Image: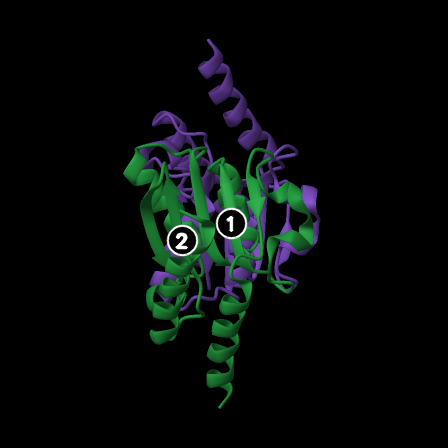
Chain colours: A purple, B green
Amino acid sequence: MPDEYYMEMALALAEDAADNGEIPVGALVVCRNRIIAKSRNQTEQLVDVTAHAELMAITSAAHYLGSKYLPDCTLYVTLEPCVMCAGALFWAQLGRLVIGASDPKRGYSRFGSALLHPKTRLETGVLAEESQALLMKFFNRLRT
Amino acid sequence: MPDEYYMEMALALAEDAADNGEIPVGALVVCRNRIIAKSRNQTEQLVDVTAHAELMAITSAAHYLGSKYLPDCTLYVTLEPCVMCAGALFWAQLGRLVIGASDPKRGYSRFGSALLHPKTRLETGVLAEESQALLMKFFNRLRT
């Protein structure tokens, strides 16, 4: 399936986050054409700054595979990962990372591409506008 | 209590990690002179690259306090945090970070001090030799 197909699903997870008062970020992990993990931001609900979509997706995927490492996996995430999540993706030796919108303020890439594992292939800007629109809608609603 | 007192306890947690086949890293969180979280590396046991001592200590401390943020807390950790854990400490707005041994290869500081929150006060090198000795003993045992 094309990247857009999975990113649409990640966007639906992000919308679910927004509906529950969370910053809308969704993630899923695909391994050999099978979705093995789905998650969305839960920092408010779990009262835990580490409950980002990517971190929970990595944990779920590792449990599913029975392996700490994810070299044959693609992680789709609607927003550029933060430093914490990029660090986790490094440890997981993720095979491929597909990002929706960029995050100039809190994204990992401010610190350079070396935060990701050298073997992680990177794709950016997939359904970026849709993800950005979801984030803007969420923050605009917070302000009113 | 002096920093060395708490770091001794973190070193005991690191030893417990080593005894269970984990890279020996221990952490604890102190808030208003009370220890509110203790943890040690569990990546092998939990089959999860995110199960670093610091990440679990942050989650535990947040649950104890009922708050995502830890501005009045000090985290003691026997080894310099990695990028992932530094990113988590940033989000937690940690008040103070006390580090044992430095980690030139995987420590966050390769990417500069901006990975930590600007309000996090930093102390390094507390019982560094003891922590380093524990790590060397662990890796030497692995090699034989």
Q: Position of residue A98 (x, y in %)?
A: 57, 49
Name the chain under label 2. B
Toward the bottom, the furthest residue is B144
Q: Is residue B79 left or right of residue B27?
A: right
| Type of amino acid at the residue the image marks with label 2 | Tyr
Q: Secondary structure at mark 1?
A: strand
Q: Secondary structure at mark 2?
A: helix
Q: Position of residue A115 (x, y in %)?
A: 64, 53
Give the class, few, some or many, for how many residues have Cα within 10 Å of label 1's Cα (few <14, many ≥20).
Answer: many
Give the camera-side residue of A130 and A52: A52
Residue at 65%, 52% in the rendered image: B109
Mark 1 or mark 2: name the one nearer the start of the chain: 2
Residue B42 appears in the picture as rendered: no
| Type of amino acid at the residue the image marks with label 1 | Val
Residue hosting label 2: B6
Residue A60 appears in the picture as rendered: yes
Toward the top, the furthest residue is A144
Residue at 36%, 45% in the rendered image: B59
